[in-house]
Amino acid sequence: MLVICNGMLRSGSTLQYNLASEALEAVGHATRVGYLGGFRSPETKARLEEMREAESLYILKTHEPPLEPAFYTNRVTLLFTHRDLRDIAASIRKKWNKSFDEILSDLDAMIDIHVQIAALPRILIQPYDRLYHAMPQALEEIAAHLGTSLTPEIRARILQHNALETVSEHLAARRRNPLLTLLGRLSGRFRIDRKTELHSDHISETGGRDGDWQRLFGTDEKRALEDRMQHWQHRIGELGSETGMGATR
């Protein structure tokens, strides 16, 4: 069986992946696949189908558009995260310093993925605000969606592992590791924790706060971002607000 954690870029999908992984690991065996892209390559699609049909449980993270609806049988469970597009744009700029045209292209792709995936069955859609500011509620929703029951002790442990302060210290420790620093320089990129899928620079210096778009973008850019917000909300509204923005189906 297969659990797929999808989500918009910079919207808390890695946190959702780790909460779901720990919830599954606490009650039985689950294999973390990590990030998986290229869903439409024959090799990757065959691997996805193999994991779907396996008796054991696999969980992966992606930002890929969904496959054809027929793939999503009752052996596939979906989770998805979304966030205010303006804050996503600010986070993309801070992390990757992309051009504004590239940021708009990323936003358009994420809107399309959200619309496609919201129509699929067995999906839990969660907003960024719930994951980061109401994590206990988010964890309860994830556990219920996955059919797991967590004891208070396990719940507390998972929340502690994934608290912003804990994760920030973990990433800071990795940055202080001279071997990891050297490897990062040699590879030209920050190192990734293969278990958690956390990058060394995963959390910005502002701790993932909202509202930075107001200072990072000019007047015309802000207007373009507002237009994207309206377009996204209109398309999701056509699906039904509960289905599109935060519900279990």
Image (cartoon, rainbow, N blue to C red):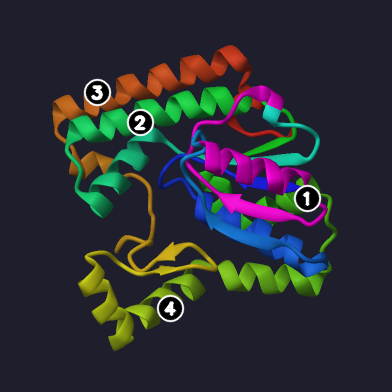
Q: Which residue is mark 2?
A: 107
Specify the amino acid type for callout 4.
Glu
Q: Secondary structure at mark 3?
A: helix
Q: Residue at x 84, y 68 (%)?
A: 151
Residue 57 in the image: state x and y as whole percent: 75, 55
Q: CA distance from mark 2 to mark 1?
A: 34 Å
| Disc number for residue 54 | 1
Relative to the observer, which residue lies in front, 191 or 158?
191
How far separated are the C-alphas under marks 4 and 2? 30 Å
At horizontal 75% and vertical 61% (from top left) the residue drawn is: 24
**Disc 3, disc 1: CB below 8 Å?**
no
Q: Quadrant of the C terminus?
A: top right
| Residue 224 marker | 3
| Eye-nearest disc, 1 or 4 | 1
Q: Sequence order check: which comes first, mark 1 or mark 4? A: 1
What's the amino acid at mark 3?
A: Ala
In this picture, which residue range is highlighted in magenta? 42-70
Q: Residues within 10 Å of mark 1 (few under 14, many from 20)?
A: few
Which of the two labelled residues, at mark 4 and mark 2, occupies the earlier sequence position?
A: 2
Amino acid type assigned to the residue bearing label 1 in the image: Ala
What is the C-alpha distance between the residues marked 1 and 4? Answer: 37 Å
Disc 4 designates what residue?
Answer: 169
